Image (cartoon, rainbow, N blue to C red):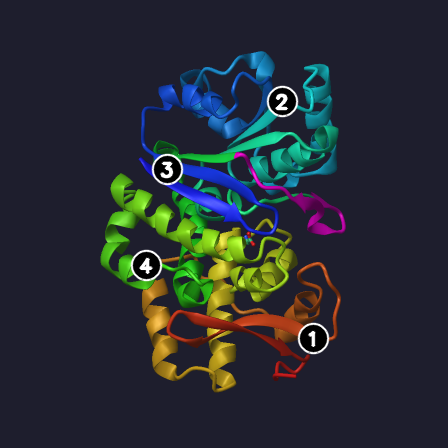
Amino acid sequence: MINLNVNIKENNKTYPIIIDNNDIKLLKTEILKHLKGKKFVVVFSQKVDKLYGSLLGFEKNDKFILKDGENQKNLKNYEKILAFCLNKKLTRDDAIIAIGGGVAGDIAGFAASSYMRGIDFIQVPTTLLACVDSSVGGKTAVNTSFGKNLIGSFYQPKAVIINTNFLKTLDERNFKTGLGEVVKYAFIEKSCKCKEELNLINFLEENYKKILDYDSQILTELIKICLLLKISVVENDEKESGLRRILNFGHTYGHAIEKLTKYKKYTHGECVVEGIKFAFNLALNNNLIDKNYLYFMQDVIKKFSFKEIPPFELKKVIPVMKTDKKSSTDFIRFILPVDYSTVKEFEFNELLTIS
Ligand code: GLY
């Protein structure tokens, strides 16, 4: 078992992250230890409930089953979760648990942050993407017709409990979307201000075959490394006023092509990987890196055989990139590589030259 801790200095908030591969039958007891007898509602991804519901053993009455898919992260379901909690007469002392991927975690976290002005929240991520990224750091949200994640809050969970057994049933595409975020961490590691030297790029190069074989021990180590990097970033900048923006490496272009394809054609991770390639090319064109580092990135990424996305016309992508990150500006903000596993933020104008 691995125990990590998040300490958000700004508001003195501390919480544990537990990573293990114990029998899933034992997980309910493990989760309830963090609740100390409180009442709770479990927001359950439908897919995970089908596969693991009976093993986990939560009462039907305590479960809000959420269909899968990004489009389920909407205000209607948010309201339904709150009504479910009200019907169960949850009080301010009670809790919401999310069991599922990023969709369940984001919407349940937002419900927890606003129910009775905020109740305890436990994240049990079951996808690789949720394990390495969305379950930690306190971003919660729902989508609206105006865009993704525009309504939400920063609300840190009380605990994050990761059981790597869930990953065994992830299909390849879902697994690789998580690997897209993993690769992102590798190329930003030195900028994360982590005290430990983790060398994620080496880890990926040495272990990519085992990772692609879903080797449990290696995946546990991989999640630990990514989370140590994420923890270091969010501890320094919970509300994304500075350092946390580096986690958007690959996301400026990535988000734009996700949006242009209506969030249907490609997964988030596939788009992030394309965004990383775009960022490297932009960095090369602006003499921030040399060609060898670009080739090096291509070699690392090739090992994971991500789905390739054909390039989009810049005149279509640029207007979408300009409105990324909840702000409409005259410039486009990019996180770009400047050295081995090091990134910096730059502002570009519409011609994609540094402004
Ligand atoms: N997923 C990026 C962040 O948590 O800031």
Looking at the rendered structure, which numbered label has been put on residue 198? 4
Q: Which mark is residue 94?
A: 2
Question: What amino acid is found at the position of numbered circle 1 in the picture?
Answer: Phe
Towards the viewer: 238 or 284: 238
Determine which residue is flagged by label 1. 331
The answer to which of 100 and 265 lies nearer the viewer is: 100
Q: Nearer the viewer, mark 1 or mark 2?
A: 2
| Residue positioned most to the bottom | 287
- In the rendered structure, which disc, 1 or 3, sits on the residue that comes first in sequence? 3
Residue drawn at (69%, 31%), measured in percent from left and top? 77
Q: Name the residue tied to disc 3.
A: 19
At mark 2, the secondary structure is: loop
Above or below, 347 against 29 in this view is below
Q: Quadrant of the C terminus?
A: bottom right
Q: What residue is shown at x 48% (from left), y 67% (from top)?
A: 276
Magenta residues (range)? 143-158
Q: Secondary structure beneath disc 4?
A: loop
Sequence-wise first label, 3 or 2: 3
Label disc, if present, on residue 33 of the rendered structure: none
Contact flag, marks 1 and 4 (Cβ < 8 Å): no
As drawn, 182 above or below 327: above
Q: Quadrant of residue 82?
A: top right
- Residue type marked 2: Asp
Disc 1 is placed on an element classified as: loop
Quarter of the rendering containing residue 352: bottom right
Q: Nearer the viewer, mark 3 or mark 2?
A: 2
Image side of residue 26 versus residue 79, left or right: left
Residue type (three-letter) at the residue carrying disc 4: Leu
Real-space CA distance between mark 1 and mark 3, rounded to the nearest whole angstrom: 40 Å
